[in-house]
Amino acid sequence: MTSSKPKILVTRRLPETIEARMATLFETDVNESDQTLTAEDILSGIQGKDVLVSTITDRIDADLIRRLPPSVRLIAQFGNGVDNIDLEAAWAAGLTVTNTPSVLTEDTADMAMALMLALPRRLVEGTQLLLRDRAWAGWSPTSMLGHRLRGKALGIVGMGRIGTAVAQRARAFGLTIHYYSRNRRPPAVEEPLGATYWPDLDAMIEAVDLVSLHTPLTRDTANILSAARLDRLKPGAYVVNVSRPELVDEIALIERIESGRLAGAALDVFDNRHGINPRLLVLAEVNRVVLTGHMASATLEARIEMGETVIVNIRTFMDGHQPPHRLLPDTPVARARG
């Protein structure tokens, strides 16, 4: 007897409660190994399925989309970012693509604020010192001196949901808020934060002490913190990135920290295509850089909410309705038809 439930392929392991709920609602095939699937793995597993539940580690490019079986009608991304999916190719192939926005806002903002504190206050270094020596010589007036945040200027690149949540937290720590974004936020957002809008990113970069990146990766934002822009930063400035590694010229950032021109960086994301850059690891070892492994959204609460959002998108779509988090490519024709 053929099941009437939607058939889905889930490319990575998800929280147990989400997998159990999916198993109840759908005919579910989960990648038990939790290793990143190759294109051939995906094509093999997706045969006869209706929905591909992808994550950011899956490369859903035009070639893979072209080779998907006709049964596949929906790509339900488990995640907010979708730069791993060729949206134009998916749209041209008649596929619907969804994501899980909004649920990551608070956790990502928390991590950005934690990194802003960790870097100038030398939190990682202080912990490592105690673990290395297995002892503490005691308090000293000149020991482990860092820098305070209050009174410093924070430049936020991308004042969307996450950028705004970061600004709210940073304001409470006494930072002055500056931002660059594609669209200026209304007075109801700016005024409580005392936020200053800069239509020119280069001008803002020159005026702040810390830069925090909160913009999605697009053609326009790739390498938005280029070598030239890094050179515009104040000497001794900091860079924080919890968004996408491709937003920063990583080699240029490393060079400017190595030379002492920039005080350091706190990176939750970095280029790992061929392993972490050894120079970046050295900077982390000498506490000029704080590295965390894409942990900004890594809370159980966020992962469960992401899974529930995926389920809502699938059920809505399979019931014949437009899912609430449908994505369109940034083209005039797609926008008109969407």
Image (tube, grey):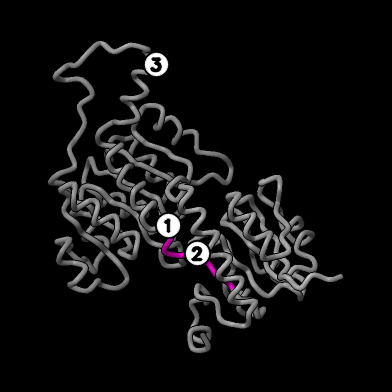
List x then y, in percent, for residue 37: 69, 52
Kindly identify which residue carries mark 1: 104
Q: Quadrant of the N terminus?
A: bottom right
Q: Earlier in the sequence, mark 3 or mark 2?
A: 2
Query: Mark 1: few, some, or many residues within 10 Å (few <14, many ≥20)?
Result: many
- Tell me how far mark 3 sits from mark 2, CA to CA: 41 Å
Q: Quadrant of residue 275?
A: top right
> Which numbered disc, 3 or 2, marks the residue closer to the eye?
2
Query: Mark 3: few, some, or many residues within 10 Å (few <14, many ≥20)?
Result: few
- Tell me how far mark 3 sits from mark 1, CA to CA: 35 Å
List x then y, in percent, for residue 303: 51, 53
Q: Which residues are magenta?
A: 97-104
Q: Main secondary structure of the magenta part?
A: loop
In the displayed structure, would residue 130 be above or below residue 252? Answer: above
Q: Is residue 327 magenta?
A: no
Query: Mark 2: few, some, or many residues within 10 Å (few <14, many ≥20)?
Result: many
The front one of 88 and 311 is: 311
The front one of 278 and 70 is: 70
Identified at 29% across, 58% down, the residue is: 165
- Tell me how far mark 2 sits from mark 1, CA to CA: 8 Å
The disc at residue 132 is 3
List x then y, in percent, for residue 43: 76, 62
Q: Secondary structure beneath disc 3?
A: helix
Q: Quadrant of residue 75?
A: bottom right
Q: Quadrant of residue 51?
A: bottom right
Kindly identify which residue carries mark 2: 100
The disc at residue 249 is none
List x then y, in percent, for residue 20: 64, 55
Q: Secondary structure beneath disc 1?
A: loop
Amino acid type of the residue that numbered disc 2 sits on in the rendered structure: Thr
